[in-house]
Image: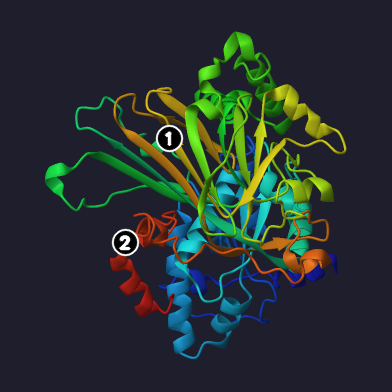
Amino acid sequence: MKKIEKNSMLNEFYIPTYITVPEFPTEKVSQIPSCPVIVFINTTSGGQLGRDLIVAYRKLLNHSQVFDLLEEAPDKVLHKLYGNLERLKRSGDTLAAEIHRRLKLIVAGGDGTAGWLLGVVSDLKLIHPPPIATVPLGTGNNLPYSFGWGKRNPGTDQKSVISFLQLVREAKDINIDSWHIVMRMKSPKSSTCDPIAPSELPHSLHAFHRVPNNPQDMEYSCTFRGGFWNYFSMGMDAQVSYAFHSERKSHPEKFKDQLSNQKTYLKLACTQGWFCTSLFHPMSRNIAHLAKVKIMKKSGKWETLEIPQSIRSIVCLNLPSFSGGLNPWGTPSERKQRKRDLVMPPLVDDGLLEIVGFKDAWHGLVLLSPKGHGTRLAQAHRVQFKFYKGATDHAYMRLDGEPWKQPLPTDDGKVLVEISHAGQVKMLATKDCLAKGIHESPAMSTVHPETSSSSDDTDDDFSEERRNFGAALSFRYNDDVKKDQKLGLL
């Protein structure tokens, strides 16, 4: 009897093979699934947990609806899936129509893996994008934690997987802001500064090449674009994260469980100088000495953001979770809110980023106290970093948990990083969700989300780069738009 009940429950999530594999013959099912899911798993995440988890999911669900991200990229999977769903719907297949309407996605991995899938879904530009649930398989797990999925790595046995699927079925949709990032480097042809290798970039950040207006005057130019949903950070926190990822890549056998990973992370924070400023970290690498920071608020005009000289790390935050579940913004009093022209409280769908600074790791430890917070700098819906010439030969940056070492030209080159609001995506949230939206905040119920002013696409030349995140390889160029229109994806 228990086996029959289990099978009946799993049928609520089951997707027949012919839906995901166009070449497969049509099959009949006993019931229409109430919560059909497509599952993406990063089998390298969580030590051996990713490999164990994919085995459990494939035993419980149809093998063809569970994908290993090392073998199949999500953009190709979803492109094929939605193209097939449209074809089946046009032929009168009612099951395909219901699966299309009810579909949900599950992604298991770190924050970077989740951001990769979010970028792909955003680039698909679907009329009804599927909401996404995140399984915490990383070290920090800020995205899953923000939406109530926890921050500890989950069990990989069938009972644990079934419990998670039941939570997915009961979860509610919540909209969150998407943020576009464009990074452009311009250097003379003779510059010794090479662009970063694609293999070193976060999943959601890609090279984007444009044809210059005047090829004869062409400088050495490289542009990267991408997106994030939790945070962009720069400085010492990203440097420690980069050291951790480099160590894990060199010695993967040492990183088999979440606790040992966190201990290694703390050790690297000490050796990288995050605690000992005077001995390990020159003042020339403080944020104020690295770059000029500008923000855009309600007025739609750029204004310079003054950064204290002591700030060594800056975080542009969208969700209430950073560095393994800490909230660096905290809850400012009404007096501080008025004094600093801040919106209260920070919401995930208000079109604003919270910009926070940290002096060192000791400053970060303040977050462990009930009312602890970083140095609140501003709230804005657009941020720009313009790096000073010769300040340093590289800077450490991080997008949703994925760090990289960004080379900077020491000659007459220019480096510009710009962040702007780019719509919203749907996440799945449990009853323990920490993230709050405008409709859940009585004080903000009459406030409309901040949007970029009409001048956003005309006061610079980034409009072309902003068309997509670039996370989906098959959706980078205009030629693909025509193909998608034929498939009914746009």
Residue located at (31% from left, 61% from top): 477
Q: Position of residue 424 (x, y in %)?
A: 58, 64
As shown in the figure, which amino acid type bears the numbered disc 2?
Answer: Tyr
Picture coordinates of residue 145 (x, y %)?
74, 48
Q: Position of residue 155 (x, y in %)?
A: 75, 45
Q: Residue at x 56, y 39 (%)?
A: 44
Residue closer to the observer: 190 or 172: 190
Farthest residue to the left: give it: 216
Extreme residue in the right direction: 370
Q: Which residue is mark 1?
A: 200
Tags 1 and 2 touching, CB below 8 Å? no
**Residue 470 shown left or right of residue 33 in the figure:** left
240 is higher (above) or lower (below) than 12: above
Distance from label 1 to label 2 (Cα)?
Answer: 22 Å
Quarter holding the C terminus is bottom left
Mark 2 closeness class: few <14, some 14–19, many ≥20 residues within 10 Å: few
**480 with respect to 421 (left or right):** left
Q: Residue 477 bears which disc, if any?
A: 2
Q: Decide if residue 245 is in sight here.
A: no
Vertical placement of residue 152 versus 249, above or below: below
Query: In terms of image quadrants, where is residue 450?
Result: bottom right
Compared to 234, does 205 lie above or below? below
